[in-house]
Structures are given as C-alpha cells and as structure tokens.
Amino acid sequence: MIFKSSPIEQISFDNHTFFLKRDDLLHPDFSGNKSRKFHYFLENDFPDIKKIVSYGSAQSNAMYSLSILAKMRGWEFEYFVEHIAEYLKENPHGNYKGALDNGMKVIVGADSISTQSEDVLSIEEGGRQKEAEYGIKILAHEIIDWQRENNIKELNIFLPSGTGTTALFLQKNILKRQPKGIVPMVYTCACVGDSTYLKKQFLELEEDEKYHPRILSLEKKHHFGKLYRDNYEIWLKLQQQTGVVFDLLYDPLGWRTLLAHLEVCKKPTLYIHQGGVLGNESMLPRYERKYKM
Ligand SMILES: *Cc1c(COP(=O)(O)O)cnc(C)c1O
C-alpha cells in the first residue's frame, strides 16, 4: 500500500469534542482526499498509458494531485481550463504553480475533454469517477477498524462535499463492511452548487439511496469560491482553538454547517480533514485583503 493509515486525533472546538481524521497528512504531496480518489491509479498497472488528460479550474486540488500522479508514474499531464485569471498567469502560486512545476501542460479555452485513445487516461473534473471507490473503501475500513479498536459504539461522520464522490463511496463502503448493528452515518454539505445538485451527483454514482449520505445545509445560499466573512472567521478560530490548518474552500462551510446541527454532534463525531491546504495560498491573501483588520 502506498499510503499508511492516517491518524485520528481528538480536538475541542467551541466547547465540543470531535475526532479528526487527518487525511491531510496522508502524503506530503497529494492533497488529502485526492490521494484516496487517485489511489487506484497509483497501485495498478497501466502498461499502455502515456498521458493523463483532465479539466477543471486552474486552482483545483485535483489538478495538483494529478500532476503528482503523472510525475510519479512518468506520464505526461495535459489539463484543460476554460479560463485563467491574468493575475494567476503572471504570478503563478498555490496548486497552479505546483502543478506547472511538476510538468503540467495547460490548454486554455476548453472546459471538457474528448480525447479517446488507448494511451490516454481521462480523468473527470474533481476525480468524480468510479475508480475513486478503490481508495475511499480503504478510508472506510480504516474508520471502522479504529471505531472497533476504541470501542466506540455510535459514530457520526462528517465531511464537506464538492462532487460528493468521497462522501457517497464512504457511506456505501461503511455499510458494506458493517451491514448489521449500529452503522456509522455519513453527514455532508454541498459546497459546490446546492443540496439538489449534490443529491443528483449521488444518484449518478449510486442508484440505491440506502447508500446515500445525509445532506445538511444552512439557510443561506453559498457560492463556491466566494469570500464570506463567516468563513474566514471560523477558519481563523479553528486554527486558534485546535492548532490545525484547514482548507479555505470546503472546511469553513463544513464546520459552520456541522455546528448548526448540534443534534448530529450529540453522538461521537468524526470530522474528516480532506487536505487542500496548498490551495490556501491563493485564498488566504484574498481573504486578508478583504477582511483583515
Ligand atoms: C476535492 C475536495 C473536496 C471535495 O471532495 P468530493 O469528493 O468532490 O466531494 C473537499 N475538500 C477538499 C480539501 C478537496 O480537495
């Protein structure tokens, strides 16, 4: 196995105790949950593949992790983006710079890929594909084993979603591993789009709704990548109280949503830190310009 099981710590936040699964520490280069999602492509043989092709935003965690995967496997990496901000082009930083340093070739002006060739591995935006289940199943087993070793009878799990791939395959593989008794429930929130969009994503990956995570939400609408004072404040507070650096795109909404549903936190609750901290290099200066006193 490429990755060692990630540690689980106990933290205290806003007078509540949580367990924290440190998937951000899985690998020094891969971004947390993307190492789970791309695990399959690291461990299996692909003798014909010479190149990875993918698409999405120029700041994405998946893009950076794919550049690592390509480098480790000696493949080329072509990435399609619709648009790159002038500022980023002139001052590469964060995931974008990291991926360029790893040899990524960027193609601007396209937002999807159509290459069909035997030597090309096509990866969906954000790693939303069935192969992701391979690594997320390992995550599910790590959690169940830890729960058993520590005699934790009831457990809720929370993680914020983008495509929902991680949350869905997690709930599914927990249920498959432990079909009887008190089964840990996976709770999530939609950071990209709304709960209706997330539900649709779940259905595309799995028709059987018994495997779907529970979606929690806040009353106010949230736009992905937009700067919110509440997000910045909770991110700072998390760091002050727990000493852990979280990501600025998903985790602030995740924590705000979880704390707005204290009925979930009544049971022992495990929050999954899914990495993405390199992306803070672009988000943090924007937040500081806007809100820092
Ligand atoms: C990609 C990512 C997510 C979202 O994962 P999905 O499987 O798309 O729901 C959440 N947090 C971080 C830090 C990520 O990089």
Image (tube, rainbow, N blue to C red):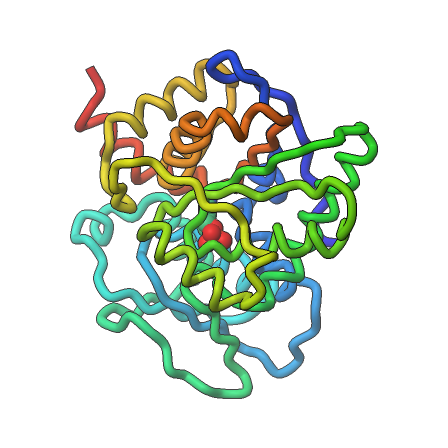
Residue 74 horizontal side relative to residue 179, left or right: left
Residue 213 higher or lower than 19, as above or below: below
In which image quadrant can residue 254 be found? top left
Please identify the residue farthest to the bottom as the structure is shown: 117
Q: Nearer the viewer, residue 226 or 59?
A: 226
Q: Nearer the viewer, residue 260 or 84?
A: 260
Residue 172 higher or lower than 81, as above or below: above
Q: Quadrant of the N terminus?
A: bottom right
Name the residue: 29% across, 48% down: 92
* x and y percentages locating residue 20 in the rendered image: 60, 29
Residue 34 horizontal side relative to residue 230, left or right: right
Please identify the residue farthest to the top as the structure is shown: 15
* x and y percentages locating residue 48 in the rendered image: 62, 83
In which image quadrant can residue 287 be found? top left
Name the residue: 25% across, 37% down: 220
Residue 213 horizontal side relative to residue 140, left or right: left
Name the residue: 29% across, 46% down: 224
* x and y percentages locating residue 216 in the rendered image: 43, 40
Residue 23 horizontal side relative to residue 120, left or right: right
Name the residue: 33% across, 66% down: 106
Q: Nearer the viewer, residue 40 or 104?
A: 40
Q: How many marks?
A: 0
* x and y percentages locating residue 97 in the rendered image: 36, 50
Q: Quadrant of the C terminus?
A: top left
Residue 157 higher or lower than 205, as above or below: above
